[in-house]
Amino acid sequence: MIKFDQVYKRYPGNLEALQNITFEINAGELIFVTGPSGAGKSTLLKLITAIEPPTHGTIIFENQNLSQIKSAAIPYIRRKFGLVFQDHKLLYDRNCYENIALALEINEVSINDVRGRVRAALDKVGLLNREKSMPISLSGGEQQRLAIARAIACRPSILLADEPTGNLDKKYADEIMNLFYSFQELGVTVIIATHEIPTTSKKYKQLYLQEGNLIKITDH
Amino acid sequence: MNYFVSHYQILLKALQRSHASMVSTLMMFLVIGVTLILPSISFLVVQNLKSISQTIQHESQITIFLKKDISVDAKNKIEKDLKSRIEISNYHYVKKEEAWSKLQKSMGFNESNNGLSENPLPDAFFISPNIVNSNQIEILKSSLDRLEGVDQVVDDTGWVKKLNSMLHLANKAIFLASILLAFMLTVVIGNTIRLQMTSHFKEIELSKLIGATNQFIRRPFLYSGFIYGLGGGLTAALSLKLIVICLNQTVVEVEAIYGAQFTIVDLTPQQYLSIVGSSILIAILASFISINQSIKKL
């Protein structure tokens, strides 16, 4: 599904973010990308979603070479991912419903289906009763759940999360992780970049990065 | 269907956005309106002067001064020639004695105090041509000049020609000024759209991250540009119409005092539409340039 082959990413100023990264992710897997700060976890996610192009190497996603993709095709690639960010990236001048509806609008979902899909996504994350609430009135955990609802509303085949529990206490963090596990059980590929892997009985693959190098790939 | 509904919804959003910042939207309408009124009024003035000059040209006369020693035969020949020409609508002959007497009367002279030993005026034909075109008038003049017994052919449209060339120059000046003003409008509208985009930066950034195309990001801001253009264009067209109505009312008063007949020629509906159309076009173009520059920076 996703294949990295000798991928390098260098930022201006000769800052080597990733070096010689090679790995493969199969559909339906649960992946934890771990490592200390500055290891290159976020850069790796940016390369997968074509937010950044690689400096060198090949990235294959669903038989498409992301290293050579035309810029006009990038938005359509990104639509296949559900993205969850540490800072949620919610729009605070729109209510919960509108935040999710925007993602569906971008994905060109039929207007007749938007309402049903938004409510289904909110229901999935337990926020159906907060449909009209503004994000600012939600707790940190609820805001992250809303961000997940926005990501899953478009029914992506891959869910990517960059430090999704970084700003949450343990109780909320567990809630969020359980949500991700539930989507993986439904067949969605889940890739989570995190400092620490939470305790789980789930089968997962770990990519451990350090100073831009992929140190080890382990199956648990 | 989904496509049109989506466009309709984005237009509604753009309208809501404009309504939310009503004062700045109205200010924008005013800026565009006033900027467009300036060349439009100049155009209107030139059009009116042109129509006046054409009327004057149409009423112009050509005078044929005959040689002092012209024979009766030669004079009759000229008259016959004038009669046969289709480009001459009418003419009349004034004898030198008649002209001299009229001149003395108008100047308040008589035979004893005019200081001249003899009548200096020649016999003359006064011709009203039924052609307006200056080239045709020139051809007629030179053909009359070649007639036997003709001393000089003079037409009284010289100053009209000067006025016409001035109006031609004015037209060019208006065209150049319009280009400059259009450029200024492009900068002003573009800057406003850029500021709008800055205030929606988070939304744009998120939209790009989750798969929005540039078209999707561009659309609401293009609609904002369209609203500015439409509002500004209508402001200009309505203001211009009001100005013409007001001026025509004043002209009625002038007519009553001087007994002259004159009306300000209004722009045609097509010309009013073209003001609104160009305003929309400039606004959309300015928005497009500004949006593309901002998107590139994202």
Image (cartoon, coloured by chain):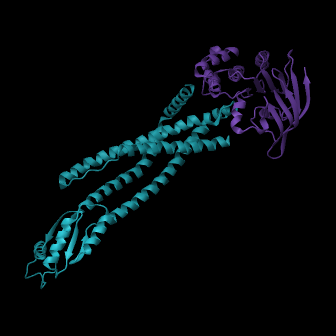
Residue A31 spot, x, y in % from top left: 84, 24
Q: Residue B62: which quarter of the image?
A: bottom left
Residue B15 spot, x, y in % from top left: 50, 32
Q: Colour of chain A?
A: purple
Residue extending farthest bottom: B117
Q: Residue B103: which quarter of the image?
A: bottom left
Location of the N terminus of chain A by quadrant is: top right
B177 with respect to B159 (left or right)? right
Residue in the foreground of this view, choosing between B207 and A157: A157
Q: Residue at x 76, y 24 (%)?
A: A158
A101 relative to A60, above or below = above
B115 relative to A88, above or below = below
B278 with respect to B249 (left or right)? right
Q: Is residue B273 visible?
A: yes
Location of the C terminus of chain A by quadrant is: top right
A163 with respect to B285 (left or right)? right
Residue B77 spot, x, y in % from top left: 17, 73
Q: Is residue B24 visible?
A: no
Residue B219 spot, x, y in % from top left: 57, 35
Q: Colour of chain B?
A: cyan
